[in-house]
Image (cartoon, rainbow, N blue to C red):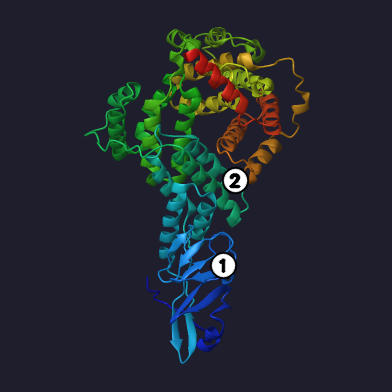
Amino acid sequence: MQNPDPQWTKTLSLAELEATSKAVVKLGGKQILLMKSGDKIYACNNRCPHEGFPLAEGTISEGCILTCNWHSWRFNLDDGETLVGGDALRHYPYELREGDIWLDLADPPAEEVREKALAGMREAFDEHDYERIARELARYQRADGDPLGALCQALSWAMEGLEFGTTHAQAAAPDWLSLRKQMTRKDPIETLIPVVEIIGHLSWDVLMQKGPFPYDDQVAEAYDAGTFEDAIEDEDEATAIAQARAGLNAGGAELLRPVLERAALRHYQNFGHSVIYLDKAYELLDLLGKQAENALFLPLVRSLCSTAREDLIPEFKAYAPALKNWTNDGSKVPEPTEFRGKGVPAVLKMVADGSGKQQALYDTLMHAAADAMLHYDARYRAYTDKPVQQNVDWLDFTHAITHLNASRKACVDQPQLWANALLQTGCFLGRNAKFVDWDQDMEQWAVEDGEGLVDDVLASMLDHGEPLYIFPAHTLKLATALKEELELNPEASWKPTALAALNRFVNEPVKKKHVRRAVTQAAKFVELEG
């Protein structure tokens, strides 16, 4: 694109360049490499767009190919194309005037820079090139682009790459953006970190799947809540997506909310993810605006249609009868410690006994979930000879708390869902009871400055150092959920226990790969398979 306002600047004479064939000039805060090859002159940034090493130390080969000798990125000087590597190398127009070389140092129009940065970011997204995602986002922001606009683009790129819809990448996104708003010092670096982390996570999740997985393009003639709800329950994605599109067109995501809340809590499903994904989709919509609706809610509907429904397996068969027999008049709320050691049926009966005192039940279940997490038996991280169903780790316990946090918000809208939410929390407690050691001394994890701990954990996310996205996503979601709950109820009885559990969680190592366990379990499975 021709710059309408060129900034011509005299550099050096053609004779000087011919004497050396290459020269570096410093102009306007830039290092520019001038080269002469045959009868052609080239001017480009001296810093390689990969990691900034000086291209003046590179090699020019036949065909005017410039190679950076640090990592062998190669650039075609004739057309500016990057042949090996990713980011584009900036070139400068030149003119010869009375034997002198003049360069146009004017920056390209901001719109052109933003378009190029988004195109580069898409390439980086498809390859999960985290560092390039960061560089292109920095270029986009420097050209007056809103990083949240780039995030909306990334959500759209991810939409058809996710076979089962929403993942932790979208679910952690509003917590990252909340951190961006609350914890950063308006430092451009710190405001970029959360957005890069979200886009990187989306990219990784898409790369791990063999897409694309296109959506049916049908749109229902009119939105019908009953048809939408039945389609989700029947796992009829095509009809559900057609209804979702009609609803989004007619009234936006708010029109879909009642059905989605019921669908997310109808079953004990997806180990609590469904209602968390729902809650976070609406939080993210509030932050990004209507432009993100399709990219957020079509994957959410897909996830609800395809999710595992654990209440259909034997371990949780007591859930459906307990829900059916819920009366809303039970008055006996158990103490948190009464849940210790109880299996799923016993826990669900105890929850049902307090059905008429839902807020009190909520508090006691939050306390019991934090108590179980605090007393997690960490030996299960080390076992290599247990069956697959005993592969239990910290994240199995964090979900009880984040699920309850998300469920509370849906129940504010639809109080009849309290039965589902509270009984499902009971499923977590009963299931996790076998993986707890109540005899541990937990005094070492007690916290005096609870608010300070939560803020420190959140702040640490800006440089967490964890290569696997799933772990910082859960840490961020847990700390955010506790912060939300304690802001609503700063004197909650469960506060000391929950903060001690968070303290232990972030300070004890998490085993992230189970080599011996995986191979042992695989071998035993194959042996039984025959």
- Residue 84 percent coordinates (x, y): 47, 59
Q: Residue at x 38, y 26 (%)?
A: 306
Furthest-left residue in this view? 221
Q: Nearer the viewer, residue 396 or 324?
A: 396
- Residue 294 percent coordinates (x, y): 36, 41
Q: Secondary structure at mark 1?
A: loop
Q: With 94 as the anchor, is 234 left or right in this view? A: left
Evaluate whether residue 8 shows in this view.
no
Q: In the rendered structure, which disc, 1 or 2, sits on the residue that comes first in sequence?
A: 1
Q: With 393 as the anchor, is 162 left or right in this view? A: left
Is residue 277 depicted above or below 328 in this figure?
Answer: below
From the image, tell me which residue sits under label 2.
Answer: 182
Residue 432: assigned label: none
Q: With 187 as the anchor, is 104 left or right in this view? A: left
Crowding at label 2, few (<14), some or many (≥20) Cα neighbours within 10 Å?
A: few
Q: Give the residue type that dot 1 points to.
A: Arg
The N terminus lies in quadrant = bottom left
Q: Secondary structure at mark 2?
A: helix
Is residue 473 depicted above or below 323 in this figure?
Answer: below
Whether label 1 touches label 2, CB < 8 Å = no
From the image, tell me which residue sits under label 1.
Answer: 47
